[in-house]
Image (cartoon, rainbow, N blue to C red):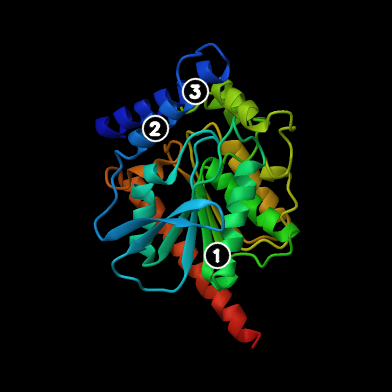
Amino acid sequence: MNIEVKMAVHAWANSLGDLVPVLKGIDTTTRMSDIRDAYAHMLAQNPAPAGVRFETVDMGGVPGTLVTPDIIKTDAVLMYIHGGAYIVGRPDGYHGIGGNYANRLGARVYMPDYRLAPEHRFPASINDTLRAYEWLLEQNVPARRIAFAGESAGGAMVVSVMVAAKSQGLALPAVGSSISPWANLEHTGASMSNREGLDPLNAKPVLDILARAFLGDTLANHPLASPVFADVTGLPPILVQIGENELMLSDAMRLATHLADNRVRVNLEVWPAMFHAWHFYATRLPEAQQAMESSVRFIEAGLADADRSQAACT
């Protein structure tokens, strides 16, 4: 990791740490809106690539951002679900990664701006993202032409929103790409302790506080909050990418195993020496660019497979 990326990750970690005194009631002067503004500004230091444009859209009552590449190669759509521990994050901080996906796929990318905790606790974020997906279906976008991707909390929602969609009897998207998923809010994986100090972004005591702020009185093993406990039968192919140095490594591996055990086609990629959601640094870190390329290939293959399956049935 070069010095520029190290400094950026350090700033990212500090921005998450700033949440703790506010959530614990120690800091009564800093507003959540100020922290969220600072977080979005920090992530926006990873700028949008050339060749894309952004516009605000209403996704069935859920605000969102549409990213459109100058060169559209497919009618497929990606719904990118941002992370931020369900507490921070919004699409204007994700122009870099959203724009990268749009350019690489040659596809439109929708990023829902779901409600955040602690003002809107579980399951508001999942309900909003599910509603955004329903809206895409209502726009006559076939489910087989929709892919999901997301990082951290959004990586978990790649799976949990599919589970929620299945429970509502909705057609499922063709494929999902889950980056550094925050998949088990019980935080029981071995890497929560043996990666402490190696993960430059996360610390278990902070994650525990963030999880409780999101969950409120809900148990951490609720299947939509922690998809390692969900009924995942019947889900489409899912790619799980995780960094070797992440606190979330063990729980991401557990998610991949849980998917495979339930006959979901899953690819697990453990990236040597990588940290949480390293994809943000695709312009500065070769491994981030390579991971993005792998994610795009998986999404393209999943969309193609869904089309072939549809053709075989007609």
Element under disc 2? helix
Q: Which mark is residue 19?
A: 3
From the image, tell me which residue sits under label 1: 136
The Cα atoms of the two marked residues, 1 and 2, are separated by: 28 Å
143 vs 246, nearest the viewer: 143
Indicate whether 144 appears above or below 66. Answer: below
Q: Please name the amino acid that badge 2 sits on.
A: Asp
Q: Earlier in the sequence, mark 3 or mark 2?
A: 3
Place of residue 4 in the rendered image (x, y in percent of width and height, measured from the top left): 25, 32
Q: Earlier in the sequence, mark 1 or mark 2?
A: 2
Furthest residue toward top:
26
Q: Which mark is residue 37?
A: 2
**Residue drawn at 61 percent across, 79 percent down:** 309
Quadrant position of the C terminus in the picture: bottom right
Element under disc 1? helix
Furthest residue toward bottom:
314
Quarter where residue 253 is shown: top right
Residue 200 can be seen in this image: no
Q: Earlier in the sequence, mark 3 or mark 1?
A: 3
